[in-house]
Amino acid sequence: MKPLIIWDLDGTLVDSREDLAEAGNAARAFLGLPPLPLATITGYVGDGLMKLIERLTPDVATEDRLRAKVAFERAYQDACTVHTKPFPGIPETLEKLHALGWTQAVATNKGLAFSLRILAGLRLSRWFADVQGGDGPKKPDPGQLLTIARLLHGDLSRSWMIGDHHTDIRAGRAAGTRTLLVRWGMGHPDGERADAEAHHPADILRLV
C-alpha cells in the first residue's frame, strides 16, 4: 500500500476559465439568452456539468436545460484546449513529485472524456497513474478517491487530496486523506479547513 497524491483538475492543475465560459455562453445563446461575464460563469464551476448548466439557465424548463447541456458539450468538445493551460509551476511540480516517488492521480467533477482530452492536449497525462471523472460519483462524494486507491493499491491515510474547492476538501476528508487547499484557483473553501494551504505549486513540494 502506497501513498498517493490525488489532484483536482479545473482551478488546481489547469486554468480553464475562458474555455468553460465560452461553452457556457454558447449554451445560453442556444436558448436565446444573453452572454454572462467570465467572472460570473467562473463562480458557477466546480460541481459537475449538470449543476453548471442549472446555474447558467435559471428558470428554464427541464427540456430546454437538457438541450443547453448538449449545446455546451458540442461547443466544449471543439474548444476545451483553446485557452486552457496549466497554472504556472504545475508541470515542474508534477515532474518533481514524480521524481520523488509519488504516485499521482486526478479526481475531477468534469466528465472523463473532456478531462483526458485536456490532460493529453497539455502534455500532462504522463504524470498520472489514473484519472477519474465526474460521470459517476462527484465530489464531495469520496467515490472517485476510493476507486483510485483501489486501482493503485493506495493507502489513503498517507495520501493527499489537492484542490481549490470545498468539494475537494470534503471528499478528501470523507475518504480519509489529508487535504491541501490551493489558493490560485477559481473555487472557494466555503468555510472548510484543509490540513495545509498552498499559494504556489512549488509550496506543495514542502507540504506533502
Image (spheres, grey):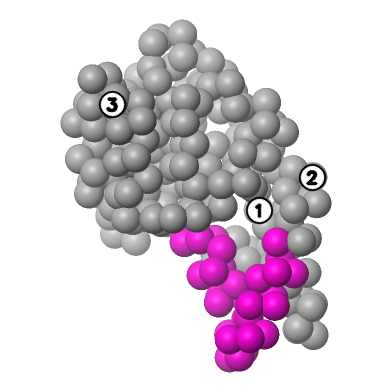
Amino acid type, label 3: Gly
Q: CA distance from mark 1 to mark 3?
A: 32 Å
Q: Nearer the viewer, mark 2 or mark 1?
A: 2
Residue 40 in sight: no
| Horizontal arrangement in the rendering, residue 202 relative to residue 61 (left or right) | left
What residue did someone put label 2 on?
Answer: 82
Check disc 3: other Cα within 10 Å, few if <14, some if 14-19, many if 20+: many
Place of residue 36 in the rendered image (x, y in percent of width and height, measured from the top left): 71, 73
**Quadrant occupied by the C terminus:** top left
What residue did someone put label 3 on?
Answer: 154
Amino acid type, label 2: Val
Amino acid type, label 1: Arg
Earlier in the chain: of badge 3 and badge 2, it is 2
Are circles 3 and 2 on residues that touch, CB within 8 Å? no
Place of residue 9 in the rendered image (x, y in percent of width and height, measured from the top left): 53, 42
Q: CA distance from mark 3 to mark 2?
A: 34 Å
